[in-house]
Amino acid sequence: MKNTFAVVLVTSVLSFLTITSSAQFSLSIGVNIRTAPPALPVYTQPPCPVEGYLWCPGYWAYDEIDGYYWVPGVWVRPPMQGYLWTPGYWGYSGGIYGWHAGYWGVHVGFYGGVNYGYGYGGTGFVGGEWRGNSYHYNTAVVNVNTTVVHNTYINQTVINNTTVNNNTTVNNNTTVINRSSFNGGPGGTTTRPSPQEQVAMRENHVQPTSEQFSHNQAASKDRNQFASVNNGRPAATAMNSVGGARFNQQGRNAPTAVARPATGMRAQPQPMAANHSQPMAANRTQSMPENHPHAQPMAQQHVQPMTQQRAQSRPQPMAQQHPQQHPQQHQQQRPAPHGEPQGGHEHRRER
């Protein structure tokens, strides 16, 4: 019993302290996030497109270069009958925000007390249930088209019974929530696992499906999903299926995805004017860190135009008056333009 507890504890600590860019699914050692994830956006849930699909709420994932990005809530196919989705959540401890990955299981476990809405009010799940081999939807809290989905029921009592941290579900189209997206720390939820959730956490779990992986990756490639661009208001907050229709916060068609640079937005060089004097070019090159991936290309970009400009501005009468008298002396006295190939090669050898 003691050994089992130790294994669970060590696993929990490692998964808490380590994050990579696909925050929900991949964990690696060495990344410490000290900035809290943004608040959860309030959005409209699209109707379930196919009977048997389950709702996976949206969440803030993390990219090591460009920070937090929003993965839209989406209707997905469960890996097998009888399984429910436990969302992942951010937790705060010791000044660090860590991601606890979501999973599939026969019961919904602990997800940090975060009110994701649409059945995930912070504790448990009331958006639907398995009855034998068919899944039935509670239309009091989830949005389904009854002409497409026939296995439905209405349980209004769960709305009040699942209120957590003053969160309140309004209807099946919109939720008003305490928008905190993490557990613990300043501004986070204070919920702790219930005995039932602790049991669910120890059950056999199934990792996210391949569709959920691709859904996460697609969001990470859309620059409009990043908090640094959208200020906490992502362009697409929800989708009716993986790779399907995109919806904004009001449930209308979201803008088309905008490709994020493969190297990340923060790694891209800033546009420079075509005509710069020598001091400006020198300052620009010296102020850029040597290990910056674009430092050398930016320095080389203006070598030839600046050299030609210096040559054209040199007084011609003096050069014609003494064309052969002191060629070596003239060459030694003229300072080498900053960024010429000779200086660049010497600088690289010093590295």
Image (cartoon, rainbow, N blue to C red):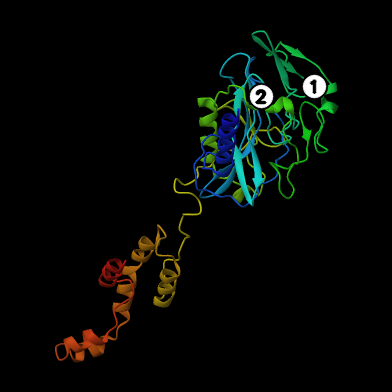
Q: Assign the N terminus to one quadrant of the image.
A: top right
From the viewer's perspective, is 101 left or right of 132?
left
Mark 2 lies on residue: 200
**Element class at badge 2:** helix
Residues packed near mark 2 inside 10 Å, few (<14), some (14 to 19) or many (20 plus)? some
**Residue that appears at 81% across and 38% down:** 165
- Mark found first going from the N terminus, 2 or 1: 1
Asked whether residue 239 appears in the rendered view, the answer is yes
Location of residue 74 by image quarter = top right
Q: Residue furthest top?
A: 132
Give how far across and how far down residue 297 sits, in percent.
36, 60
- Which is nearer the eye, 205 or 236? 205
Q: Residue furthest front?
A: 2
Give how far across and how far down residue 259 sits, in percent.
50, 42
Residues packed near mark 1 inside 10 Å, few (<14), some (14 to 19) or many (20 plus)? many
| Residue type of the residue flagged with mark 1 | Ala
Q: Assign the C terminus to one quadrant of the image.
A: bottom left
| Residue type of the residue flagged with mark 2 | Ala
**Element class at badge 1:** loop
Please, is residue 264 above or below residue 12 in the view?
below
Residue depth check, mark 2 versus mark 1: number of the one nearer the observer: 2
**Residue that appears at 34% across and 72% down:** 306
**Residue that appears at 36% across and 67% down:** 302
Mark 1 lies on residue: 140
Location of residue 324 by image quarter = bottom left
Please, is residue 276 above or below residue 220 in the view?
below
Q: Residue furthest left?
A: 324
Asked whether residue 124 appears in the rendered view, the answer is no
- Which is nearer the eye, 56 or 92? 92
Marks 2 & 1, CB-CB < 8 Å contact: no
